[in-house]
Image (spheres, rainbow, N blue to C red):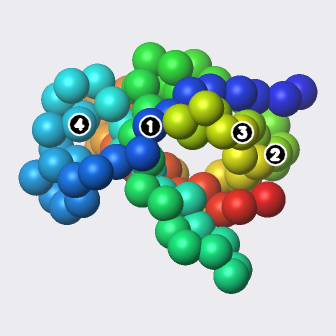
Amino acid sequence: MSYTFNAQTRTEIGKGSSRRLRHAGQVPAVIYGAGQEPVSIQMAHKDIINLQLNDDFYTSDLTIVLDGKEIKVRVQAVQRHAFKPMIEHFDFKFA
């Protein structure tokens, strides 16, 4: 199964800006890989929360539409809230 979701490039980096994103219903994330510059992104929490419940979300290639350009990635790491059903941060790796 293929998963596709939209994301935007983040302009502000850091703990404070990540907290503001989470309060606004966004999830901060980063895409990195060998030979490429890391890209900080943000995506809507409501778009990703139900997708990540599927097991194959973590093992298959995902497509992120980043500012109109499609990027193939894989999930590298997920940080979840301690007791709320919320995603705190995603790490993606270029596929």
Percent x, y of residue 20: 14, 38
**Furthest residue to the front?**
68
Q: Find residue 21 and name its label.
A: 4
| Residues tagged 3 and 1 counted as in contact (Cβ below 8 A) | no
Residue occupying image coordinates x 69% and y 80%: 34
Residue occupying image coordinates x 83% and y 44%: 60
Q: Which residue is mark 3?
A: 70
SS category of the residue bearing label 4: helix
Where is 26 relative to 69, above or below?
above
> From this viewpoint, is residue 78 visible?
yes
Label 1 CA crowd tier, 10 Å (few <14, some 14–19, many 20+): some
Percent x, y of residue 53: 63, 27
Quarter of the image that includes the C terminus:
bottom right
Percent x, y of residue 1: 89, 27
- Considering only order in the chain, which callout, 2 or 1, is on the residue closer to the N terminus? 1
- Considering only order in the chain, which callout, 1 or 3, is on the residue closer to the N terminus? 1
Residue occupying image coordinates x 68% and y 82%: 35
Q: Which residue is mark 2?
A: 61
- Considering only order in the chain, which callout, 4 or 3, is on the residue closer to the N terminus? 4
CA–CA distance in space, label 1 to label 4? 12 Å
